[in-house]
Image (tube, rainbow, N blue to C red):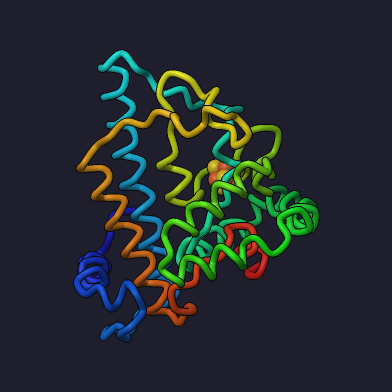
Amino acid sequence: MPLTPRQARLASELISDPAYVSGERRFKTPITRDDAVDLAGSMHEQMDAAAEARATAAKGLGKPLACGPGCSGCCEELVMIFRPEALRIARWLKLRDNAAARQRFLEVYPDWKQRVGDTPTQIADLFGSGDEAAHEAALEAHWRRRIMCAFNQDGMCTIYPVRPLLCRNAHALETSANCYGDNPTQLVRLRLKSDELDAFVGNARSCLRAAHHAIGGPRMRPAALCDAVAELL
Ligand code: SF4
């Protein structure tokens, strides 16, 4: 879904001022929920193209990506998102063709919610506090609890076409054995460094955060993927 000229202009304006990204300043241009969903879709498409190039590069280096169907260690990380991605996923789940995925999610969500407790709230608080180290530590502590994302069914992502940017960027080289949070060696999980791709991901995340603020989302406050989508269904 290529961006229209207006959407492309919006995307570049949204990241033109750090105060839009942080929510300190109100975005100057009216932006609709449809715009936000389209921006998320475009970021996802661009991310897929970049990830494909990364997979090819990894293969060329003799260190192919270990990720594949049924491999879901990274699905035990707590995925925190902003509203544009939550809206895109909720809209997709409301399509008649995706009724089974929606129903399955609504069935398993209460158990997921009960298991995660108030961790998403604590992590959202830490994100806004600017305490990077504490935020990272809380995410890692959650990961070690090994609570599977409520959108994962038998190792497969039930919202694969609309999964968040973070999920599209997750990858491991050669083996996924170190991708599980209770693996003592998980911190040495190998990723392929790419300045270009890392810069794209940084910009895409900034754009989605600024769009979140522009459509009235709470300032510097992401939500856990499952919570954010459940609230919209
Ligand atoms: S949305 Fe899909 S890919 Fe992302 S954590 Fe959940 S199951 Fe895994």
In the image, 135: left or right of 52? right
In the image, 69: left or right of 98? left
Q: How many marks?
A: 0
* Residue at the (45%, 66%) spot, across then down: 84
For residue 97, say whether it is visible: yes
The residue nearer to you, when weighing 143 against 159, is: 143
Residue 137: x percent and y percent? 52, 52
Q: Is residue 26 above or below residue 193?
A: below
Image quadrant, ligand 1: top right
Quadrant of the frame with the C terminus: bottom right
Residue 125: x percent and y percent? 54, 70
The residue nearer to you, when weighing 120 against 109, is: 120
The residue nearer to you, when weighing 42 against 147, is: 147
* Residue at the (28%, 34%) spot, across then down: 193
The residue nearer to you, when weighing 39 against 174, is: 174
Residue 161: x percent and y percent? 50, 45
Q: Is residue 72 above or below residue 111?
A: above
* Residue at the (66%, 56%) spot, across then down: 96
In the image, 66: left or right of 201? right
Outermost residue to the top: 62
* Residue at the (71%, 55%) spot, across then down: 116
**Picture quarter containing residue 144?**
top right
Residue 101: x percent and y percent? 68, 48
Q: Is residue 125 above or below residue 218?
A: above
For residue 159, say whether it is visible: no
